[in-house]
Structures are given as structure tokens and as C-alpha cells.
Amino acid sequence: MDILETVQPIETMLPDRYETMSIEEMEARVREIKEKLGAKLFIPGHHYQKDEVVQFSDSTGDSLQLAQVAARNKEAKYIVFCGVHFMAETADMLTTDEQIVILPDMRAGCSMADMADIEQTERAWKELQQLFGDTMLPLTYVNSTAAIKAFCGRNGGATVTSSNAKKMVKWAFTQKERILFLPDQHLGRNTAYDLGVPLEKMAVWDPHTDSLEYDGNMEDVQVILWKGHCSVHKNFTVKNIESVRRNHPDMNIIVHPECCYEVVTASDYAGSTKYIIDMIEKAPSGSKWAIGTEMNLVNRIIQQHPDKEIISLNPFMCPCLTMNRIDLPHLLWVLEATLRGEHVNVIEVDKKVTEEAVLALNRMLERV
């Protein structure tokens, strides 16, 4: 027999055997592997993950927070990131070369991040410079690809989170007259409006038509919003708010700033995932809340606060579909492969891209 015939190929897709295992069997196996790998393994879990995954997370939080926690964990050799692709990219960029970042399912992407690719962005930047000259600074939401973060880094810009967007937009206006905000138009619009920029001074860049959507005098433009959005938060509507106001007049409405301007304006409160969690945590017992954010998180908040009446702002919401690709079978699969010394679904960002993207990240971290 040829020696090559004895070598077992590394499986690159979820093997069928995991589909037939019981939940109890998989959970017991994950616990066993976690115990065997000990401090060499670190599992960050995003707030939007399923409970079946979150229960095994060593830390839960938002995307940047988890990447930073992973970067501080120098003991862990393997970082199995339970989130989506851009989050694992950020973790890879912030951790050491010796640490290995793994995404349980490579199909776990982010539709918002995918709405701004680097070719579209470079093309847009060239067109916008012809319109506005050297008067713009690019900012990107951390919910973007490593390549877009790198674009901002090399053009003097920075990243923002939903928690610090106001601080970063304020800073950007001390650097240039205008900002290009990628890839979520709603966070950009809501943030700029809160800072006093009128809607009439905001334009929208459509990457599919390579055109600027704006009716006024170009000289008046202060904010150029990329035409992107979150596929989850776009499903919260003013009609949802009207329904809650009608059926639950004493209920507080709190939403994420990835919701559209009309929804944010009609709500009682708007803020980041951490803001929402903290608000509910601090709210008095017996208070009533309608929450406009991802369903897995809303359901978890409901379970954690039985003393409060909490509903989803949209009762027909589904969880984030791409985030939900990370499930118990995929988590177990990559953990078993890791235990065998096989590296599947490894996330590695190009060195040059990493250098430029970290510039953008650091410009933010230095100011918040």
C-alpha cells in the first residue's frame, strides 16, 4: 500500500456524523474537549449567538470587545470565535502570529459587511475625490471587512463602534470637512443627526450605480453615507412602534442605532447592544420594554429578567441568519479537529492589510 493512501484528508465541511449525534452527546463532548485543552483554548461568543453555543463561551460581548479580550489572552493558542467572519478577522489582526483563530462555519458572514467590498470602495473614493477633493475622511463601522478597515487606515480614517460612533464622528470633523461613513448608512445618519448635522447635508453613495444620491448644492454635503444596512435591524418599522404604542401604551421602546432614522426617532431610547443590555439591567422591576434588536439576544434578555415585561418590537422577527450558522455541531467539529492537531476554518488576514487595518483600529482606541 502506498503511504499516501494511509493519510486521512482533513475534512473541510461538517461531516455527516454530527447530524446524527444527540444534543446531550455533543454537549458532553464539548465539555470534555474544553477540559482537555484548558487554557490553550478560548471561545469568545457574540451576543447574537444561539444559547446552544453561548453556554460554552468563555466570554460574551460585542465584536470588538471580544477581539480585544482575545488579544489580551496570551495563554490561548486556539481562539474559536463564535461570531461572523469580520469578527474573526479582527481577532486575528489583534492577536499574535502564534495564536490561531478559527471560525466554526466559514459561511457565517455578515450581509452588512458584504455590502462594501474593497473594489467598490476604491472606485467610490476616486469618484468622490473628483467631486469634493481632499476634504473627506473615511470612517468604517467595525462591522466591515478587514480590507475596508485597511482602506480607512491608509487614508487617515478610523473605525467606529455603535458605542463610540459620536466621539469618532466628532473627531473626524476636526480632521476634514466631510466624512464618508461605511458600510451602514443608518448608524451614520443617526449619529451625524444626533451631533447636529441636518439630513439635508447628508448624501448617500450607491455602490451599485456608482452614483451620489443628493438633490442639493454639493458644497453643502457634510456626510456621505454608504448605501448599506443591517438585514436584521432594517426589519423594525414605524408600524411596529405604532402597534406597541397602541397595545402597550406604558411600554418603553429601545432600539439599536442600526435601525433606520424614522424608527430611532420614534423610539424612547436608542443605543448599542451594551447600552440596551445595561438599560434593561438597571431598569426597575415591573418595568415594560419593547426591544428592537436581534432575536437571540432579546430572548436571552427576557429569560434573564423575569421581573420585567419584555417583548420584541417586531414579534415576527427571525434571528440573524448568518450568525446562526454557528451551531453546536459546527462548534464540536472544529474543537475535535483542533484536539487532533488539525486546523480547519482558520482565519488569516494578509500582513499588509493587518497593518493598515490596525492603524484604523488604533486611531479609534486612542480616542475612546
Image (cartoon, grey):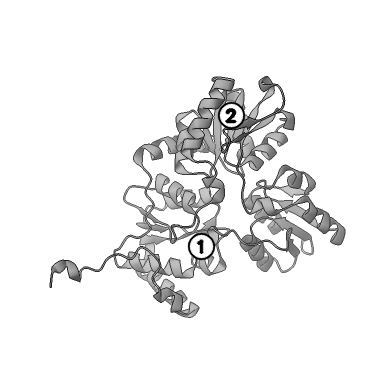
Please report the residue visible at 48 percent of the width from the left and 50 percent of the height from the top.
87
Q: Is the residue 96 above or below the residue 54 in the image? A: above
Percent of width and height locating residue 189: 68, 37
Q: Nearer the viewer, mark 2 or mark 1?
A: 1
Q: Residue furthest left?
A: 1
Please report the residue visible at 69 percent of the width from the left and 58 percent of the height from the top.
281
Q: Is residue 93 visible?
A: yes
Quarter holding the N terminus is bottom left
Image position of 11 (left or right of 183): left
Q: Which mark is residue 81?
A: none
Quarter holding the C terminus is top right
Q: Which residue is mark 1?
A: 325
Q: Quadrant of residue 150?
A: top left
Amino acid at the residue labelled 1: Arg
* Dot 1 crowding, Cα within 10 Å, few <14, some 14–19, many 20+: many
Percent of width and height locating residue 210: 56, 33
Asked if labels 1 and 2 touch by Cβ distance under 8 angstroms, the answer is no
SS category of the residue bearing label 2: helix
Q: Which residue is mark 2?
A: 172
Give the mark, 2 or 1, whose residue is nearer the N terminus. 2
Q: Is residue 362 visible?
A: no
Percent of width and height locating residue 172: 58, 29
Percent of width and height locating residue 352: 36, 37
* Dot 2 crowding, Cα within 10 Å, few <14, some 14–19, many 20+: many
Amino acid at the residue labelled 2: Ala
Image position of 241 (left or right of 205): right
The Cα–Cα distance between marks 2 and 1, rounded to whole angstroms, is 36 Å
